Image (cartoon, rainbow, N blue to C red):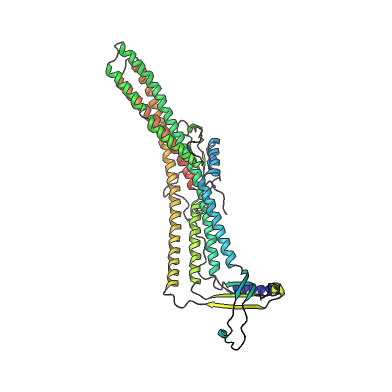
Amino acid sequence: MLKSAVDGTRRMLVSAAILGMLAGCAVGPDFRRPEPAAASTYLSGAQPTETVAAKGPGGNPQRFDTGTDIPSEWWSLFRSESLDRRIRIALEENPTLAQARARLAQAREDRNARAGATQYPAVNAGISVTRQKLNLASLGVPNIKEPGPFTLYNASISVSYVLDLFGGNRRALEALGAKVDYQRFELEAARRTLAANVVNAAIRQASLRAQIGKVQDLLEAQGRQFAITEDRYKAGGVSALDVRNQNMLLDQTRALLPPLGRQLAQVTHQLAAYLGREPADATIEAFDLDALHLPEEVPLSLPSSLARKRPDIRAAEALWHQASANVGVATADLYPKITLSGSLGSQRTDSGELLSGVNVWSIAGNLLQPIFRGGELRARKRSAVAAYEEAAAMYRQTVLQALQEVADALSALDTDARSLQARADAAEHARVGYGIARQQYLLGGISHLALLDAQRQLLQSEFDRVQSQADRYADTAALLHALGGGWRDLE
């Protein structure tokens, strides 16, 4: 009998809830995905289709393949197993991604909790035991002998449900669903950014190693030159000033190594942190800049697809969607709320009779209409509308920032190629010039000061070429990163 009564009450409340949901409408704006960027190119002038070539490693020309999608693992375009391995480790071990995954799981469970609380009736069972004494006269029943103290046993089931007539609960779930999307896109953005950071750190590490190698090569050459100068001084061929000048040049060149070593240590520690390892325990293999392959065919997606490819834009869109749903929640709070509730149970003075049947029950409906709240509810709606407008502006700003980043990277690649071409030519001329100057000096054709000047020019030109080569690799990675590569398609 108790089970039959429970089933009957539950069917009544569920039916009423379904009717309420079907009859209700969701107030507030319906969010619509914004239109993509209308521009067909990223630059205001002529967009480059190919860069110039330069001599030496990293000097091949690059062609921009417009309209081609970025591969999910865009760093593989550099054809470096060492780089690929580092990124795989970072994506598995970095604690920043663990935080992002936990935030996503939290957002999902928050939505699941709200869905369970609003989409289905709340059903609670209770059992209580009460020892009490009644005063019948106080209840309006005089002249009757009062019973003694007794124990009351109560077993009951209660059911309640709030009808979502104006869609407030649905809008709240919509807002929580948008927050789940936001955290999902934030996780993808964190993955994409981490991969780009590893690439940049690896290129920076390789660049510093190359610069240190150039300094050490020059130190070796200058050491040999210093030994020759000392021998010539002993033979009376040069002055003591020439020896001191050569020694000074050695000291100046050695002075370049400590700051380069400090920068190399810092970027290595940074790379270890990206890989989720402690700097003291991390073993970071040497990375050779010349081992990188500069991508010759660079995919360049259209501006119209950028908003669908970059997770930061999708995250901004999700926040805009959430703000739109919150307007609906604030609007629904202005309208009536209807709550249906019911309960049934058994109250007995003998615990053995609790399951003998239902002897208490109730069914109730409650309507709550705000009348005067001191302007609170309308102020909350105006606040939600302002938040919606803010989210819309933030979305537009995010899109503009993304377009700017792509345009900057495209311009930088064109400039990098021309810079590398000029510096590679300058380094070649300086290398040949130094060889000629050294032979002339040994033959007594030029002064020692002229040889020192040729050495300084060679050092500067080698440094400049290595830096331009590293800049070209880094800006290629920056372009692929700005185009939204390095993450899974979320459509």
For the N terminus, the image quarter is bottom right
For the C terminus, the image quarter is bottom right
Q: Eyeballing the image, is 444 above or below 339?
A: above
Q: Can residue 251 be seen in this snapshot?
A: yes
Camera-side residue: 421 or 143?
A: 143
Residue 320 position within the rendered picture, expressed as x and y whole percent measured from the top left: 48, 60
What residue is at 56 percent from the left and 77 percent from the top? 366
What residue is at 42 percent from the left and 42 percent from the top? 412
Camera-side residue: 246 or 401?
A: 246
Residue 158 falls left or right of residue 213 = right
Residue 28 position within the rendered picture, expressed as x and y whole percent measured from the top left: 50, 69
Q: Eyeballing the image, is 284 above or below 100?
A: above
What residue is at 47 percent from the left and 44 percent from the top? 479
| Residue lying farthest to the top in this orientation | 235
The image quarter containing residue 234 is: top left
The image quarter containing residue 8 is: bottom right
| Residue lying farthest to the bottom in this orientation | 143
Residue 398 position within the rendered picture, expressed as x and y whole percent measured from the top left: 45, 54
Q: Can residue 454 be seen in this snapshot?
A: no
